[in-house]
């Protein structure tokens, strides 16, 4: 009997020591020597931009002009001159074309049109721009962002947290997200954007690069797989029969090629095998990429993928300036909130000890351990915490306090599972909110959802392992003491 | 009949008060609309460059004393040497008050003249003042005096280094964007919670879904009406609070429901 009691006491001490350890890790951290200071290797709490630092990126409607694109056959430019020279052997025509080319060159310099014509600068298009940028930022996992459009000027302000991701925001706003297949010589559009359903980025190690080349340059390849709509697949079938390799009179290869253009820039030139059955196209965009450049090109190809898949921006934007901001008012409010939460939990703990004495003290120790474990999970969840998410931390802690109270009061016939089910049925609205809000797009709701989810998930095993066992052991010790 | 009506009124007294408040709120909204938080409306930002880092609590005290309006205090430099104060609109008097207090505390020498300098230089084409004739400068100075009631010297107009105070217009974040993001998850959560309550209470109250939904809508509309009547600035924080109160109410409905279920179960067992 005495041995039994000692074992129970030892187990209780062990559980309390584990709780102290969890609390120490959570509140103090795991420290590692870094030069002359100590560094906590645990991830920091991530605060939302309104409680921490943020950047505001301002973009303006591009008011520059560009040369008029000549599509009329009568008006020539350098490309059409070359075409005419290829298709005709008549020297006279060729000379005439060259003459007219010279004449129009001066006209071209004068003929400039705005990049964004007045008719595209409408509120509907500003809304569309906002919607597309929202999609792009969401796909790029740049969370906690806010887009503000000035409908008078078209200017866009994007509020994002102050981190490395903020540097890529401009890539999602200033690129139109266009993709098309054009004839290399005539620049005639063969497959336009509306015939392309989506693109998918890929990366691979280029098997054509030998080991020696790999060490000097790189063997990584990043590209896009272009998927087409039904019309696009049909058109691809058509052009795959004409854009093929041709052997000229001298027996040399002279293929008719097409260019794949991303936002007006040719990234790949190719031709087809006439026997092939093409459903999609795979185009390498970056080749011979070395390991040290991997991150840069990986990010770049993902930006292309995201921009193209999110839709074509109807208005062209240019990056204007960036502002750094930190909200002092919210920081002051945050301090008050933290102090108030600690005070409330302290009062509740004192009440528990006074009311339930020994069991109350064990309950408080267990509650401290739970809060510590919960805060550790919040650190690892890496979800930006809003003011309400911090309130949710306090709410979940209070729920755990209520559950501990129930465990203190439960009789010996009631099992832990029964107590848990009864408790879960009562707080079901909070459980439902936790699950639904985790999937919300609003940072306010998502942050609350993530906090509630991890808090409630931790509550079940924690109280089974620690709280319930501590109370049961204390009951057993009392019983053994009573029998004696 | 009269007693029945009295009972209905007595039992639903709180909801009747709420409905009256909702009607009053509707009138206020139709007449005056909502009051918005600074972030959610077009506002102004007064930025002041300080030579030394400032303490946020001290700065908050200074601004609090210098202005009666609502404001948000921000830092716009990593080293806390630029303070940005957001407010609906700054009057010249408020700006003077703020600058005077900052001068006292941080030993700077700013006045409204520093603030207006960039605007004046642009308006009177004074960017190349060193190469302008004295007559032109004198004319500009007298015009400035006439329009702005501010006395500048040639040296002051040439000293662009002193442009350390700036006032800019900031576009507000649309509250509708917040509401749009809140709508679907909140509605899904509420419907699921009410369905849960309905399923649990199926045996004794088949209409509980509708009843609780009506009560919830009344409470939510009441809160919106309170926000409108007492002119609480509408912000994402207020929207989140209203949603939270709604969920707390559903939690209360559920706890009440579970109590009834427990009571009924005990009754059945005893019988």
Image (spheres, rainbow, N blue to C red):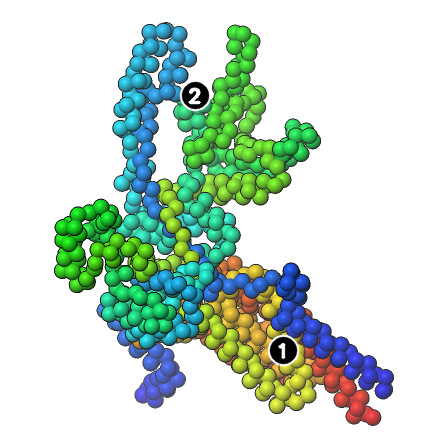
- Cβ–Cβ under 8 Å for marks 2 and 1: no
Cα gap from disc 2 to disc 1, whole angstroms: 74 Å
Asked if badges 2 and 1 are on one and the same chain, I answer yes
The percent coordinates of residue A426 (x first, y second) are 56, 75
Q: Which mark is residue A185?
A: 2
Q: Is residue A460 visible?
A: no
Query: Where is residue A199 shown, x and y percent of the image?
Result: 51, 38
Answer few, some or many: residues within 10 Å of disc 2's Cα (few below 14, many 20 plus, some between 14 and 19): some
Q: Nearer the viewer, residue A322 or A441?
A: A322
Q: Is residue A20 left or right of residue A191?
A: right
Q: Quadrant of residue B180?
A: bottom left
Chain under disc 2: A
- The residue carrying pointer 1 sits among few (fewer than 14), some (14 to 19) or many (20 or more) residues within 10 Å by Cα, namely many
Q: Which residue is mark 1?
A: A367
Q: How many circles with numbers are drawn on the protein? A: 2
Location of residue A274 by image quarter: top right
A314 lies above or below B73: above
In this rendering, position of residue B9 left or right of residue A263: left
What residue is shown at x 56% (from left), y 9% (from top)?
Answer: A251
Marked residue chain, label 1: A
For marks 2 and 1, the one nearer the N-term is 2
The residue nearer to you, when weighing A372 against B248, is A372
| Above or below B201: residue A79 | above
Is disc 2 placed on a helix, strand or loop? loop
Q: Residue at x 42, y 57 (%)?
A: A324
* Residue at the image point whose x is 61% and y is 90% from the top: A354
Q: In this view of the protein, which residue sits in the foreground, A46 or A444?
A: A46
In the depicted structure, whether residue B254 falls above or below residue B129? below
Label placed on residue A408: none
In the displayed structure, would residue A77 be above or below residue B243? above
In the rendered view of the protein, which quadrant contains the C terminus of chain A? Answer: bottom right
Q: Secondary structure at mark 1?
A: helix
């Amino acid at each position: 009997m005495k041995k039994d009691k000692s074992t129970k006491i030892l187990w209780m001490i062990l559980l309390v020591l584990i709780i102290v350890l969890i609390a120490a890790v959570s509140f103090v951290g795991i420290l590692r020597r870094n030069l002359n200071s100590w560094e906590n290797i645990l991830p920091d709490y991530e605060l939302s931009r309104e409680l921490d630092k943020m950047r505001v990126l301002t973009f303006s409607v591009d008011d520059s002009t560009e040369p008029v694109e000549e599509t009329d056959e009568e008006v020539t430019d350098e490309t059409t001159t070359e075409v005419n020279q290829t298709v005709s052997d008549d020297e006279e025509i060729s000379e005439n074309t060259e003459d007219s080319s010279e004449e129009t060159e001066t006209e071209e310099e004068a003929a400039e049109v705005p990049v964004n014509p007045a008719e595209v600068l409408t509120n509907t298009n500003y809304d569309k721009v906002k919607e597309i940028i929202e999609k792009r930022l969401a796909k790029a996992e740049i969370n906690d962002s806010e887009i503000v459009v000035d409908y008078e000027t078209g200017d866009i302000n994007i509020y994002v947290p102050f981190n490395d991701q903020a540097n890529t925001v401009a890539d999602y706003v200033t690129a139109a997200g266009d993709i098309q297949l054009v004839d290399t010589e005539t620049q005639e559009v063969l497959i336009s954007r509306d015939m392309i359903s989506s693109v998918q980025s890929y990366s691979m190690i280029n098997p054509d690069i030998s080991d020696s080349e790999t060490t000097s340059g790189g063997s990584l390849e990043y590209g896009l797989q272009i998927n087409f709509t039904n019309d696009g697949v049909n058109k691809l079938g058509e052009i795959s029969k004409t854009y093929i390799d041709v052997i000229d009179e001298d027996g040399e290869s002279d293929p008719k090629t097409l260019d794949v253009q991303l936002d007006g820039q040719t990234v790949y030139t190719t031709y087809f095998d006439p026997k092939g059955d093409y459903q999609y196209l795979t185009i390498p965009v970056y080749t011979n990429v070395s390991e040290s450049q991997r991150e840069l090109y990986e990010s770049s190809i993902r930006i292309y993928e995201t921009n193209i898949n999110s839709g074509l921006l109807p208005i062209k934007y240019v990056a204007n300036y960036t502002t750094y901001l930190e909200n002092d008012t919210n920081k002051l409010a945050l301090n008050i909130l933290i102090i108030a939460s600690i005070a409330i939990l302290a009062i509740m703990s004192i009440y528990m000890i006074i009311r339930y004495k020994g069991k109350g003290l064990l309950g408080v120790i267990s509650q401290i351990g739970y809060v510590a474990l919960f805060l550790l999970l919040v650190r690892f969840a890496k979800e930006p915490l809003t003011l309400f998410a911090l309130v949710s931390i306090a709410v979940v802690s209070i729920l755990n306090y209520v559950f501990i109270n129930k465990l203190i009061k439960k009789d010996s016939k009631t099992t832990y599972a029964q107590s848990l089910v009864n408790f879960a049925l009562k707080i079901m609205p909070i459980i439902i909110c936790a699950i639904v809000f985790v999937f919300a797009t609003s940072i306010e709701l998502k942050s609350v959802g993530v906090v509630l989810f991890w808090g409630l998930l931790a509550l079940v095993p924690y109280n089974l392992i620690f709280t319930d066992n501590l109370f049961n052991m204390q009951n057993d010790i009392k019983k053994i003491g009573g029998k004696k | 009949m009269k007693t029945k009506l009295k009972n209905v009124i007595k039992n639903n007294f709180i909801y009747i008060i709420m409905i009256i408040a909702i009607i009053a709120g509707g009138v206020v909204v139709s007449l005056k609309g909502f009051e918005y938080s600074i972030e959610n409306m077009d506002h102004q930002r007064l930025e002041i460059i300080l030579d030394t880092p400032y303490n946020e609590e001290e700065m908050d005290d200074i601004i609090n004393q210098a202005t009666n309006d609502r404001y948000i205090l921000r830092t716009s430099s990593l080293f806390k040497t630029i303070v940005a104060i957001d407010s609906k609109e700054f009057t010249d008097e408020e700006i003077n008050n703020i600058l005077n207090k900052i001068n006292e505390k941080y030993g700077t020498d700013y006045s409204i003249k520093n603030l207006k300098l960039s605007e004046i230089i642009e308006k009177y084409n004074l960017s190349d003042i060193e190469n302008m004739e004295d007559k032109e400068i004198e004319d500009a100075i007298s015009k400035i005096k006439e329009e702005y009631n501010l006395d500048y010297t040639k040296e002051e107009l040439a000293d662009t280094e002193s442009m350390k105070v700036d006032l800019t217009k900031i576009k507000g974040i649309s509250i509708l964007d917040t509401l749009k993001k809140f709508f679907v998850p909140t509605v899904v959560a509420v419907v699921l919670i009410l369905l849960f309550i309905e399923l649990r209470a199926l045996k004794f109250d088949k209409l509980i879904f509708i009843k609780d939904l009506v009560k919830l809508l009344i409470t939510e509309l009441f809160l919106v009406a309170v926000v409108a009547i007492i002119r609480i600035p509408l912000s994402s924080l207020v929207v989140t609070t209203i949603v939270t109160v709604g969920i707390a109410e559903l939690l209360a409905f559920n706890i009440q429901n579970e109590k009834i279920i427990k009571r009924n179960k005990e009754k059945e067992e005893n019988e």
